[in-house]
Amino acid sequence: MIRIALAGLGRISRRVAEGIGYAENASLYAVVSRDSKKAASFISEYGGEIAYASLGDALKDEKIALVYLTLPNQLHYGAIRECLNAGKNVICEKPMVDSTEKIRELFALAREKGCFLMEAEKELFTPLTVKIRELIESGAIGEIRAISADYASRLSDDGIPEDHWVLSRDFGGCAGDIGVYPIAYVNSFAGGAVKNIGAASADLTEGVDGFMNASILYESGAAASVTASWFWKPGAHKGRAYIGGSSGYLIVDYWKNTQAVLVRDGREERIEVRQFSDFTGEIEHGCQCIERGLSESPVLGEAASLEIMKVLEAVKESGRAEKE
């Protein structure tokens, strides 16, 4: 059983804690928060044995095997370094950091310290995604040729304060906050590294993108289109993907959902799975990797995080180019 410390008690932490609660190989052991009342309330609701006021204090606890970071993006890099230097395994909420150089540096440090490191992309580990991957590997739709994925959420309806990190020019933006989900999803099914990217973005506020689109060509020959927006609410789905193959295609509402449709030979087949929490698969996978002594995930390791960052950096560059 892997004992987990949850560092940062913002909105996403509650869903992570629920996911840990359903995991077969993990338990919520500690929380880290400067607000002692908030920490006590969190433990009362979600479990855990101890609360720490600082990450440094938590890292001295030998019982903690894994730190799950749900801190604001600008704190990720320093916190990951601190955890790894203390010999702790780390899962860090997406995007893990803001550059390819930092990704390479942190994975090198993880290997040096004998620790596990993974970016949190829970959509790659849900029961539905696992089932979709099994279908594709069995040849259900033939060779993958094209993928499309989107994600949308109207930010102005979410009550986000003006000083929230998502509105930061350096660490915020639609692409890094929600665009990362469809980017990671299409990359995971493309069957090869990113070869070429065409990107465009539109600002929500000056210097902060509120819309992004990326057209991606992969070395496998597959192509993908990714869109994310803060300007509108989605319709019947919050995040939908189409995966087209040489002999059929899949329609997947990949965001939290448990159903998909397989279309082949002119017939539709509904796919259904069971799910208690959309975070549990990610947590169980990370813990399995730790139990096996791995420094990175075979599904979402250094190479995969670098491929995600390629697209994010292309979107950023497109925004700079539009202003010149």
Image (cartoon, rainbow, N blue to C red):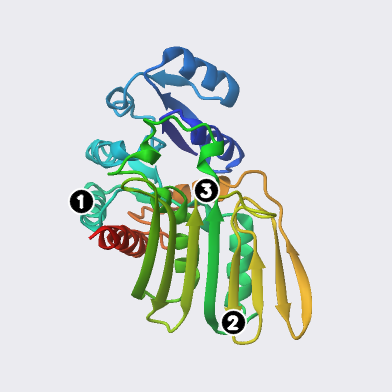
Which quadrant holds residue 32? top left
Amino acid under disc 1: Glu
Please name the residue shown 23% across and 57% down the image.
104
Q: Is residue 88 visible?
A: no
Picture residue at 78% right of the left edge, 75% below the top: 268
Front residue of this view, candidates 69 and 310: 310
Which secondary structure, mark 2?
strand
Quadrant housing the C terminus: bottom left
Lower sequence index among marks 3 and 2: 2
**Disc ID at residue 245:** 2
To which residue does mark 1 refer? 112
Q: Nearer the viewer, residue 127 or 27?
A: 127
Q: Is residue 145 left or right of residue 83?
A: right
Disc nearest the viewer among 3 and 2: 2
Q: Which residue is mark 3?
A: 284
The CA span between labels 3 and 2 is: 30 Å
Q: Check contact, mark 3 vs mark 2: CB within 8 A.
A: no
